[in-house]
Each structure stands twice: as structure tokens, then as C-alpha cells.
Amino acid sequence: MKVMILGAGAVGAPLCARLNGRCDLSLIMDDGRRSRYDGIILNRVRYDIPVAEYGDKADLIIFACKNFGLPGAIAAAESHVKEGTVIVSLLNGVVSESLLKKAFPQATVLYSFITSLSSIREGNRVECFSENGGVIFIGSGDRCDDEALFKVTSLFDRCSVTYKVPKDIRHEIWWKFMLNTAFNTLSAILQTTYRQMYDNNSLLEVASMVMKEVRLVAAAEGVILTEEDSARAESTITALHDDGKTSMHQDVEAGRETENRWFTGTVSELGKRHGIGTPVSDLLFLLLEAKSHAEK
């Protein structure tokens, strides 16, 4: 199976390490990244994964970039998609799958995300604190995609990639969106590690307020998230007692663009669309924008 990964950072590098040597693996990069590429160093182990040649077709492409990088990622992947290529998006938020379906109608796009992953990236060096490299939730939006789902999960089984196939993948994607919107945003504003978040009662109270707003806009979008889902999101974060940092925290520290627009920004936008007040999300969106601007 010819597998290509686009994005070999905090999310993609641990996955590359598990797939390396167990399938025909390569990386998709634009010309700029290709010229700077010097392998991947994960937990002090070097992996020299080749870069895919232009026009080389993939059976499976895994997107592990950021939302703001998706348009460029789609352009970089275009020459590698054939009829029947399976696409898996590990991007945060609730929009990437629809954008990938529109860009690649000849492909099969599965629904997925990754959670329980704690890792830090600096250049091509990644330190992963999660023993299993995170847990991928994956599912098909249509029964006709079940064959593609089986191909991917069979690969994951061979490569010891931890995954779950939930009954309702769309519900789970919104659950992860709720977790990211609350905890990634707060960690970026307050510059807190997982260790500093898990027993911070004031932070957890604000996160609860954000998650309540997400539940309201999710219901308007046809997805029912419950208080139990919020409790599961909190317990997922508080289970991480290490010095890892959310991706958004790392982006702020490094002066990179954040996914703020795809988290609290999306909640604010959907709230306006459905006539639902989202004052906490609105405030956090502006605070993070102000922080990012002030530190330029």
C-alpha cells in the first residue's frame, strides 16, 4: 500500500514512525519545504523518510497539517491523487473533510481526528510524550466507504496505530472540536502546559463555559453534545499530567499563525448564523487575536 503523509510535525511525526518500514511510505511537500527537509527526529531517533516525487500516485494520503495550511496542502497533494485514493484528515475543527471532498471528488474522504496526543515540535525535532502516539478516531460518512475504511484500519492494525471506529464519527468530530475550542484556546492565552492545566479549577470553569456554547451551536448544526461529552473532554485533558503543550500554545510561543479562526472563531460565526449568543467564545477569540498581534 502506497501511503503518503502531508505534515510531519507534532501530529504527523509519531504516525510516520509507526508506519515506517511497514508500508511504502513517503512525505508530500511543496518545493520550499522539500529544499529544507532534513529527515524527522522523533524522541531522539532519526527517520529518513523519502519525499514523494511529483505525479507519484498514492493509495492513501493522510493530512496532518494545520487548517490555515490546508489550501497549500491541497495544491501539493493534487498530483498524487488518483481515482480511488483514500484521504484521511487529522486536522482539527469541523470543515476539512468537506473541503477535501470538494477538492478531490475522485477520492474517498474518510472522517477522522486524533486525540490523547501530547507532543512538542521544534524544527524537525519532535518530542512525543504519548506512548501510543495518540488515538485516531476514524469512520466513514457513507456505507459505500466501508471498504476504504477497512483498508485503513487493516494498515493501522499492521503498524500498531491506536484507533477507534465510533458509531457516529460526526458526533465524535464535534466532540474533539469542543475539546480543542475550550482547552487549546485557554492554553494558548495562558501559556499553560498539560501539567499546569489539569488541576487549575479556574481554567476548568472557563473551559466548561466555552463547552456549553459549543453544545448550543452544535445542536443548531444537528449534532447533540451532552454534559457527559463535556466531562469526557475535561477528563481527556486532565489525564495528561506531563509537560506537553497544545498545538496552539506551541504556535503562539513560536510566533506562528494559530487555528483561532477554526476554534472560537467558528463558534462565534455559527452563533451569529443561528442567533445564539456566544460571549465567552467571542471574548477568547479576541483575546488570542490581541495576544498574537501584540507579540509580533
Image (cartoon, rainbow, N blue to C red):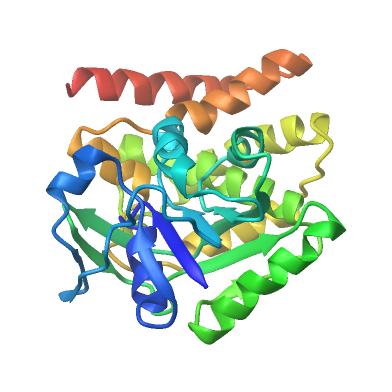
Quadrant, the C terminus: top left
Residue 169 horizontal side relative to residue 92, left or right:
right
Q: Which is nearer the eye, 123 or 86?
A: 86
Reply above or below: 295 against 18: above
Q: How many marks?
A: 0
The quarter of the picture where residue 31 lies is top left
Reply above or below: 153 against 56: below
Q: Is residue 225 visible?
A: yes
The residue positioned 79% from the left and 65% from the top of the image is: 146
Residue 147 horizontal side relative to residue 41, left or right:
right
Reply above or below: 26 against 183: below
The residue positioned 42% from the left and 67% from the top of the image is: 240
Q: Percent x, y for residue 128?
A: 30, 69
Q: Farthest front residue?
A: 55
Q: Which is nearer the eye, 201 or 134?
A: 134
Q: Which is nearer the eye, 223 or 1?
A: 1
Q: Percent x, y for residue 118?
A: 37, 63
Q: Which is nearer the eye, 124 or 48?
A: 48
Q: Percent x, y for residue 206?
A: 52, 38
Reply above or below: 29 against 128: above
Q: Percent x, y for residue 43?
A: 21, 74
The residue positioned 42% from the left and 18% from the top of the image is: 286
Q: Is residue 191 visible?
A: no
Residue 237 horizontal side relative to residue 8, left or right:
right
